[in-house]
Each structure stands twice: as C-alpha cells, then as structure tokens.
Image (cartoon, rainbow, N blue to C red):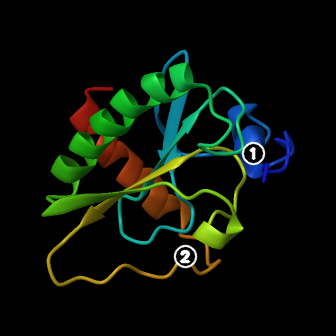
Amino acid sequence: MTSAAYDDSNIFAKILRGEIPSHRIYEDDHTVAFMDVMPQAPGHVLVVPKAPSRNIFDADPTVLAQTIPVVQKIAKAVKEAFDADGVLICQFNEPAAGQSVFHLHFHVIPRHEGVALKPHSGKMEDGGVLAANAEKIKGELGN
C-alpha cells in the first residue's frame, strides 16, 4: 500500500513559504522550528524539514539526517527553557497513527512529572503567550 502524494497546500508548506505567520524559533538551510499554535504543553515546538514529504514513508533519508540533529538541538533548548523533567518527541505517519498535517514534522514537547498533556483540541493559544514562549527557547538557543 502506498501513501497519498504530497500536497503542497498543507498548512506547514504555507508556513514554510511565509503565507501563514508563525512564531519561528530556529531556521537553517534545511529545517524550520516554530511554536505549535495548539500546544499540548507550554513550549510545544514543531520541527519541520523544508523539503516536501508527506511523512516518514516518502522522506529522503538525507532530509531525515539533516532534521534529527535540529530536533535534538530544539529538545535541549526546550528542556532548559521550561525547566522540564523530560521532553517528548512525537512523529505521526498517516491518519491511523494520528497524523493530521501531511508534511513531515516532529513534535518537541517539554514534560513535567505529574502534569498531563493537554489535548490537541483545535483551540489556538494566545499569540502573546506563543511569542513569549518562543523568546524563552530562543534564549537557550543563543538567537
């Protein structure tokens, strides 16, 4: 079974092209990291490769090799910025696994002992909160 083709009208492709605003915390030649607008915890970041792929099944291995070090870098910064006990890294592939945006992406979510994750509800976080959280992470990245 093959997955559907990549659709360049997905929201992350639009964010990458600058058609939709985002609270970016990191960018290099291959990858962008920005705040999730429906965070499951304060400091929830998405790491998105610039190269188009629907998910892990059609991603170029080179793109994965360029993206994972950024995931690690962001995870370290998020852990420090939010004084987290740990960091959850999630990556979903196809609807049955929970994927809802069909552009490869990694969730980086700070975790604190005894604090449950909020549901990915559809309620967007206040832009001021996202901007403040982005600045905390940027401070740890040295941007």
Mark earlier in primary sequence (2, 1): 1
Secondary structure under tag 2 reads loop
The residue closer to the viewer here, 3 or 105, is: 3
Q: Residue at x 78, y 41 (%)?
A: 14
Secondary structure under tag 1 reads loop
Left or right: where 3 falls relative to 12: right
Q: Position of residue 124 (x, y in %)?
A: 61, 71
- Name of the residue lying farthest toward the front: 1
Q: Position of residue 65 (x, y in %)?
A: 44, 24
Q: How crowded is mark 2: few (under 14 residues within 10 Å), some or many (20 or more)?
A: few
Residue wearing tag 2? 120
Q: Where is residue 71 in the image (x, y as percent from the top left)?
A: 37, 38
Q: Which amino acid does label 1 sit on?
A: Ile
Q: Judge depth for marks 2 and 1 and give the one in front.
A: 2
Q: Position of residue 28 (x, y in %)?
A: 49, 19
Q: Where 76 sits versus 121, above or below?
A: above
Residue wearing tag 1? 20
Q: How many labels does the image show?
A: 2
Q: In which quarter of the image is residue 142?
A: top left
Rendered-image quadrant of the N terminus: bottom right
